[in-house]
Every structure is written in structure tokens, then in C-alpha cells.
Amino acid sequence: MSMWRAAYLFVWASLLAGLSPVQASIEIEPSITASQYWTDNRELVAEELSQEDVITEIQPEIKLTLSSRRHRGELAASYQHLTYHRANETRSFQQYRASTNSALLPDLLFLDLSADRVQSTISQLGAVAANNRTLSTNRTDVSTIGIRPYLVKQWDSRWRSRIDYDYQDIKYKSTTLNDSQLQEITALTEYGGSGDNIRINLSYNGVRSESDRVTTPAEFDEVRLDTRYQMNRTWAWLLNIGYEKDSYDRSTIEKTQGGFGEIGVELSPTRKIVVNATIGERYFGDTASLRLLYRYNLRTGIEMSYRKDITQTALELNRNEETSVASPVVFDGLGNTFLVTEVFKTRRSNALFYYQWVRSRGELSASREIRDFQLGLNQEVVDFVEASWNWSVTAKSTLDLAFSVRDRETDGQIGKDRLSYLSMRVETRPTRSVSMGGEYSITRRAADIAQRYREQQAGLFVSMLF
């Protein structure tokens, strides 16, 4: 979908919702960013083949917001034009996101529409760029259209119901990737409020995903009952039961349906500590989870968690809502793009520490995820460490530091794959409409099973808001 078709969807959805300029609050925010960067590896190739270049980037952008009592629409569109002076080449990319949220019938019927376009990595085995500035060919356009009507009914102060239908159409410009269509129906009714001892949630979830070059659609249906009983101020019991059916490419010869159950407890011995633990069983085996949250004070906290479960690629893809930040492409343990019929068992451990000073905030997180793929019959282990620090040097100046390391190992592939990234960005705003600064980043990939490379970028930028 082109940028203009996204704008067309945005405008006509606004009109259909009964919005007129007289009724609406309209905000238009045009801006332009100009920057000059130096890179020592413009094509993200092996170090012995790398070539330096100077890149000029011009990126105009416009943001449009329409809002009224029953409707809100947003459109953000940008055009990124890159000039590589030594290579004597140019490239351009479009990014946009259009969305509308409309109350067709107040407090009852709602409609969300969205359309977006971003750039995404084609294969994890190729060069993974931190941004769009390099001449790497391991990149493609991804366009997504979303339609979500839903009904909401508040029967009384404790009882509420909701029905959602969500449709997504995902298309890739690269012919090596599979276009996908995802449909999801969710129905739930809830009883109980924050002050009630008993809370009950009865729900149905049905997902169907289809993909080009895949003959068998992936389907997932689940009916579940979630209950919570608050024994006292510090102790609560959790009980979840239901039935599920999981259909995918090989489900005709595997048991992929049956009842499931999960029992757990939530403990809050103090206002600073929350512990949540569950154990259960699904058709493939045991499940378990553990979560510990410790808030030392309003500025400092630690969170640790563990989860053992199973999921489909289709479900993971459908849950990815921040397409402007994260890639909607999902990969298997060999670095190839998933067929949406892939299913994997997962065990994930995660830890997060954060601290906030008066004018800055720091975070440190670490995770390990082990995936056992049911179709590819291989296992992937991913370790990830990330740290960030954001400092408001003055009322108009900021300093951002970020660092991450990802290690990946896969059964059947001998070797390692380590991707590390370090960046520093300084920005100042001399006026409300002007910002400027500089940034430096270094990306390094040490791999035996994927493309190896190292790249540095350094540059200056200036942005102006009209």
C-alpha cells in the first residue's frame, strides 16, 4: 500500500465516522530533518571488504491528528532520501502509519482501522542494520492493513462483556517472504472489580492465519475460565481451566488438542514485593511460570520472571503491534523466515533492574529464551543483555546511551552468532521548533553461521518543526 492510499483510508474513515472540520480538533505538524553521517562500512560486508562513505540524509515528515468526542485519527508519514557520495548512489524509503479509532455507537460499538509501512530485515543470517542508512540489501518494505470492530457492554459496576474481530493483511515487497492474512475473534465476559474478593473471566479466542505457499492454514481455538480468589490482603489463589485445539501443518499426526489447567498463587507480603507462581498442564506437557517484582522505592525496582509454554508463529506475529519499532518478520532457529504454521515450545527467563535519579534513568535487563521447534525439529537458544541510560543534562539538552549484546546458538549449526550494538546520542533544543545534535554508533557481528561485519557511524543532524 502506498503512502497516499494510507492517507485515503485515514481521511475516508474520518468522514464515515461523521467527523467534519467544524466538529473536530485538527493538528498539523510538518517537520524536516537533515543530517550528514560518516560510515566505515556502507554495505555491511566483512571488514576486509568494507568501504567508507559519507551519507547525506533528508527526511521530511508530517503528522496529522483529527479528534472529536467520538473519533480520533492520526497520520504520520515520512520520506527518507539518502545520498551516498563516494558510491554515487541514492536510495529512498517511505514510512507511514495511519490509524482511526471511532465510537460508532457511544459506549457500545467501536471501529479501529490502521495501515502502516516500515522497512524490515529479510533474513537474520544476512547483515542486520541498526537503521536504514546503509546500502545493505537485506531489507524489504512491509505493509500492514488492520481492521478491528468491537463491541463493549458494561452491564453494571462489576459485570462487563466484550467481542473483538481483528483482521490483518501483511505484505512484503521481497518475493522471498510469505505474505500473511491473520484473523482473530475474541469474546469475553468479566465479573468482579479491584475491590472484590472473587474475579471471574470467561473467554473464547480463535485465530486463523494463512500464508502464501502454505497450503494448510494455521488455526488456534481456546475456551478458558480464569478465576482469582483473594484470601486476604496478602494472599490470592489463581485457577485457570479450559479446552484448546491447535491446528497446523503436521497436526494430523500429532496430538494438538485437549483440556488444560493451571493453578497458582499471588503473594504480596509487603507493598514492595509481589510474587506470582503457576503450574499447569497443556496437551504438549507441563507449563509453569514465576514472577517476582520488588519495588525498593518509587525510583528503584527489580523484576524477574520465568515462563514455560508453547506458542505458534501466527500468534506471535499477530501480537506484534509496534510495527514502527519492531520488525513484523518472525524467524526460525536457522535464521529463515517462518512459515506461519511453525509451532515451538519456549522457556524464557528474564530479569530487569531500573533506577531513576532526579534527571536521569537507567535500565539493565537480561534474558534467555530456549525454543524447541516442532516442525523444524531444532532448538534455538538466545541470550540477550541490554543497558540504557537517559540523562537530561539541562532543561534543553539530553544524553542517551545504549548497549546490547545478543548471542544465538542453534542445534544443527556449528558455530556462534553474536550481535552487539553501542550508541551515544546528544541532542539540544535551542528553541521549541529546532533541535540539533550528534550521534555515534558501532555495530559488530561475530558469527560463524551468519554474515560477519563491523560498522561505525558518526554524524550530525538538525530538525526543524514548522
Image (cartoon, rainbow, N blue to C red):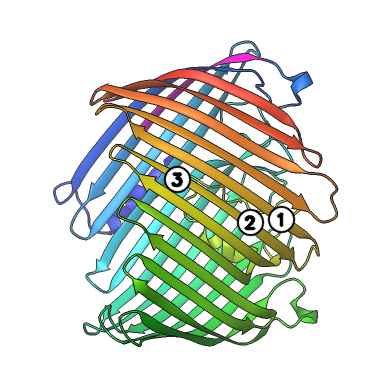
For residue 306, side relative to residue 108 (left or right): right
Residues at discs 1 and 2 in contact (Cβ within 8 Å): yes
Q: Quadrant of residue 236?
A: bottom left
- The amino acid pointed to by label 2 is Arg
- Please give the residue where the numbered disc 1 appears in the rendered image: 381
Q: How many marks?
A: 3
Q: Closest to the observer: 70 or 350?
A: 350
Pointer 3: residues within 10 angstroms few (<14), some, or many (20+)? some
Residues at discs 3 and 2 in contact (Cβ within 8 Å): no
- Please give the residue where the numbered disc 3 appears in the rendered image: 363
Segment colored magenta: 52-61
- Please give the residue where the numbered disc 2 appears in the rendered image: 368
Give the distance between the C-alpha atoms of the residues marked 3 and 2, in whole angstroms: 17 Å
The secondary structure making up most of the magenta span is: strand
Give the distance between the C-alpha atoms of the residues marked 3 and 1, in whole angstroms: 23 Å
- The amino acid pointed to by label 3 is Glu
**Magenta region includes residue 55:** yes
Q: Secondary structure at mark 2?
A: strand
Pointer 1: residues within 10 angstroms few (<14), some, or many (20+)? some
Q: Is residue 264 above or below residue 249?
A: below
Q: Closest to the observer: 384 or 43?
A: 384
